[in-house]
Image (cartoon, rainbow, N blue to C red):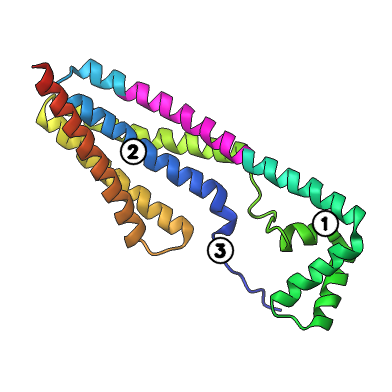
Amino acid sequence: MVRHRERHGAQRAGWLRAAVLGANDGLVSTSSLVVGVAASGASSGAILTAGLAGLTAGALSMAAGEFVSVSAQADVERADLATERAELAASPVAEFAELVGIYEHRGLPRELAEKVAAALTERDALGAHMRDELGHNETNQARPLQAASASAASFTLGALVPFVGMAAPAGTARLLLIVAVTVLGLAVAGALAARAAGTALLRPTLRVLLGGCAAMAVTALVGVLANAAGA
């Protein structure tokens, strides 16, 4: 018997979302910060300090934010589990009828829906209700530590890219190199995210590029205005 292998992105959805968000945020926020400070005419030391501070604060913020938000999702899942367990213990007949109704609504004839509900209830009634009534499943289960780690690590990697531009001499050349390496990093991040998700490359890559370039442009303008106001 030949096994049919399929590749789906659902199993990677949790950490992939956190990693893509972290890398994109690391690239955009750090490069925008560095470009804005550089455009204000600050010294190399001030630019480097601002970039490092942004990297550290951003990585910790992303990790904490992901952990809190995904933990809240996990709390909801646990609460639903406890509620459903109590309902099954208190009203098994009503819960069985509810399961039958769900399968009928999905297109199964009444008799078949009853057989499916009976088989799944006998095997794992709680699991059947969590999956088919509430939409919870192991594939999409909330994993706070995984999300926090993926987000912090990817943010750090993304935030390191703009520092390559610091190798150029101070002035316009440095700004241009920071922007150039950031744009390249955004393109790579968008393409890798699209590839990991199994989608076409063009739209996700352009989405990341346009958003990042807009953020850098606005922050650079703020830096120029700040420099002009302080002159």
Contact? badges 1 and 3 (CB < 8 Å): no
Q: Is residue 20 left or right of residue 208?
A: right
**Image: 20 above or below 230:** below
- Kindly identify the residue that appears in the image at 57 percent across and 38 percent down: 69
Q: Secondary structure at mark 3?
A: loop
N-term-proximal mark, 1 vs 2: 2
| Magenta-drawn segment | 51-71
Residue 57 part of the magenta-drawn span: yes
The secondary structure that dominates the magenta segment is: helix
**Image: 158 above or below 55:** below
Contact? badges 1 and 2 (CB < 8 Å): no
The answer to whether one can see residue 155 in this image is: yes
Residue 191: mark in rendering = none
Residue 27: mark in rendering = 2
* Spot occupied by residue 184 in the image (x, y as percentages of width and height): 26, 46
Instruction: Judge depth for marks 1 and 3 and give the one in front.
Output: 1
* Spot occupied by residue 114 in the image (x, y as percentages of width and height): 85, 76
Q: Secondary structure at mark 2?
A: helix
* Spot occupied by residue 64 in the image (x, y as percentages of width and height): 53, 30
Residue type highlighted by circle 2: Leu
Residue 126: mark in rendering = 1
The residue that disc 3 covers is 8
